[in-house]
Amino acid sequence: MSVPQYRKVAALALVAGLGFSLTACSTKGDDGGNDAAGKVTITVDCQPVAAQKELLDNWNADVKEFQNQNPDIVIKSISVGQQCNNPPDFTARLAGGTTTDVFYGYMTDLQQVLDSGQALDITPYVNKDTISTWDSVDPALKEVFTDGGKLYGVPVKNYSMGLVYNKTLFAKAGLDVDNPPKTWPEVREAAKKISAADKSVAGYAEYSAGNTGGWHFTSLLYSQGGRVLSEDGKKAAFNTAEGRQVLQNLKDMRYGDDSMGARQLLQWGDLLTNAAAGKVGMFIGAPDTTQAIVSQFKGKFEDWAVAPLPGQTDLAKGTLGGGEGYFFKKDLTKEQVEAGLKWIAYQKLTPGKGQFDYVRAKPQNYPVGLPQPLLFANGSEAQKQEFDLRKANANVPVENFALFETKQLPIVGEPRDAQAIYAILDSAMSGVLTDPNANVDTLLKTAEEKVNQLLAAGS
Amino acid sequence: MSIATATVPAQAGAVAPAPPGITKRRRRFQDNLTGHAFLIGAVLCFGLFMWFPMIRGIVMSFQRTRRGVTTWVGWDNYVRIIEDPSFWVAWKNTFYFTGLALVLGFVAPFFVAILLNEFRHAKGYLRILVYLPVMLPPASALYLFKYYAYDPGEAGLFNAILTFLHLPTSEWMQSPTMTMPAMVIASTWMNMGGAVLIYLAALQNIPGDLYEAAELDGAGLWKRIWHVTIPQTRLILALLAMMQIVATMQLFIEPLILANGAGTQDSATSVAYLIYQHGFFQNDLNGAAALGVIMLLVLAAFSAVYLRLSTKQD
């Protein structure tokens, strides 16, 4: 072969190679998830990452067992990070249409998923034949994934917030560990004492960055009886006496008492890292934050207790509730949807299986006995089964959560466009926590203008 | 050597001969076939990863997607983005950062290069030392600054130095007034090495007899810099200034890591971060695309100056 012919062959090989590479880039097959042997394949995300060894082993064991029980279904697990819904990644997957067939999302994500055009209406498929405990699932949680009478997701976890406090630091500061603060003025007093006992400890810590500041502002506002949006959801409603009280309380603790520590602009992991290191006396959070403190940030369960969320003059008038669920990608076949529902039913919604396999979890480094999730409606059969199993296998001191569990506060859901609103409210939170001269009224007014603009643009 | 030697000879008498113009074109096409085939790779890469996203972004900036349905909305996204209360704050912050970076980040490497050029010993080691931060992944370098240098307590490196010198300490990233200077310091430290090496190369091209003549005329160090070094390197200086303006206006990773996003009261929000915020947190990819196009136009203006300068240098 002459040199020019070699060149031509090389050029053709290059073109062919590029063609094959581009073909290989395509992720979607045209088999609709059914292979020649009649097996239905579905991809599911939120598989634990390698660092979560026990959780990953549990997941893989569940997949194996599920496939044994359902030999016509193949589950392909995809890990999308430890925090299954990192908003930028989630948005990119939605925009690019690269979500898995059955994909994880927060309860606040419904509008975004619908806007992206990636959601499938699963109303015709979800019933007690596909999910045997469906009738026991709390109707309020189903409602969160419903839009215009159509169901787009299946709830698999929920939470509501309380006051998380460090018993060891309470004792060190001379506070009664069995009688935690019930009001914000009491929180302020306790925080002052905790910081006075150890200058390096933040008596009370709070978020103010990465959308978590806005998230906690919302919870604090609910505790005062306020709301983020007007009833019709078209206007901001937090520039009120309740909103001012939230920011003023924080500013007083930060600059009046110096009881919130020097480091601010904290995000989720920052605060929990400090908490695990014994540098935080109190913060607001769901009971499962203690799980993160222990399993991710190497804290100790026995240090932590959770009480109901405080209010201004008594316990909170409401507490923020949220959670997570699974959506189904558009264009799935009936068989794939049914397979996905079967998997969720097995792994997420069956007492004694998957996430509720407390016998398996008991010896592992994951808590059994936390008062949440509360997926099943009060008095339902599934709730009774799950509750009995949880009590029988508890591996955490359940008495540390008794105050939270016995005093159920009204749960208020997250606002529409929650993540976008939280991003805006971060600025108000960071304002009072980093600027001693911050003007609470100005911060709220600016945030109000931004939220109203956001809502007007979205309508 | 001609590729034409490998072409298949025409089958005599099989078909009527093609008109001379077509034959010539066909032959030219066959001559360049290999070249075109090799070009496909580059064109595909540029097309897929640069031109297509760019055009798609411009198209998206005039559209709105709701419930999976995309409609044309004219200038609506642009109007909405400009009316966003953070829009002007982001531009102000971006220009402030660019200005500060010009003062500190542009001047510092030039003088470091002059200093290094003056050394007679250990030149190589010093160059490596200056270049070392460039080799550090930007995220790691910024986390070093965030947790080690800019800790607002007394444990922070900079605050410890200030305390040692009996100077007032700072809250660094938590202070709205210090946010930008702190980001510029970190950014300069991270990126200075590359510019220093370019300046060094330019400095070493200046003929030594110019300095000798200046010295004979009694010029001191500053006069030699002012009358010899700067005029001799002015094109490189101008080019790097332009490149720096274009690069610093795309400020993103510094606010993202050092300020956890917007920073205290939006003091770290840059235009690029605002694009990210709209696109990935506010479910507003179309608004993000509109802001991206606005930024593209502003940067294009600066780049035009850069291209003009580089042509002049050529």
Image: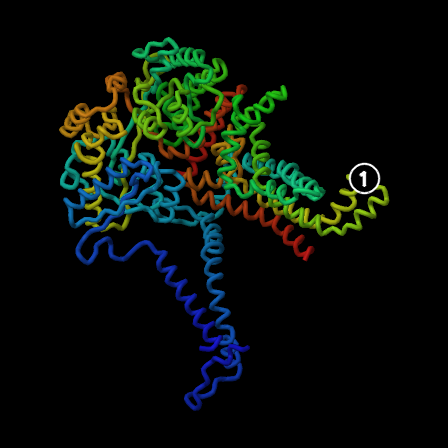
Answer with left or right where residue A222 lies relative to residue A341: right
Q: Residue at x 65, y 49 (%)?
A: B239
> For numbered disc 1, what is the local secondary structure?
loop
Above or below residue A108? Residue B152 is above
Point out residue B194 in the picture as x, y percentages from the top left corner.
60, 45
Residue shown at 18% from the left, 46% from the top: A67
> In the image, residue B44 lies at what x, y percent?
46, 60
Count neighbours of disc 1 (C-alpha within 10 A) and say few if under 14, some if 14 to 19, many if 20 or more. Answer: few
Q: Nearer the viewer, residue A303 or B94?
A: A303
Residue A5 drawn at (x, y percent): 46, 75
Closest to the observer, B56 or B67: B56
> B157 or B15: which is nearer to us?
B157
Residue A457 placement, left or right of A78: right
* Residue marked by disc 1: B220
| Residue B308 higher or lower than A365, as above or below | below
Q: How is the image coloured?
A: rainbow
Question: Residue A38 lies in what quarter of the image?
Answer: bottom left
Q: Amino acid at mark 1?
A: Gly
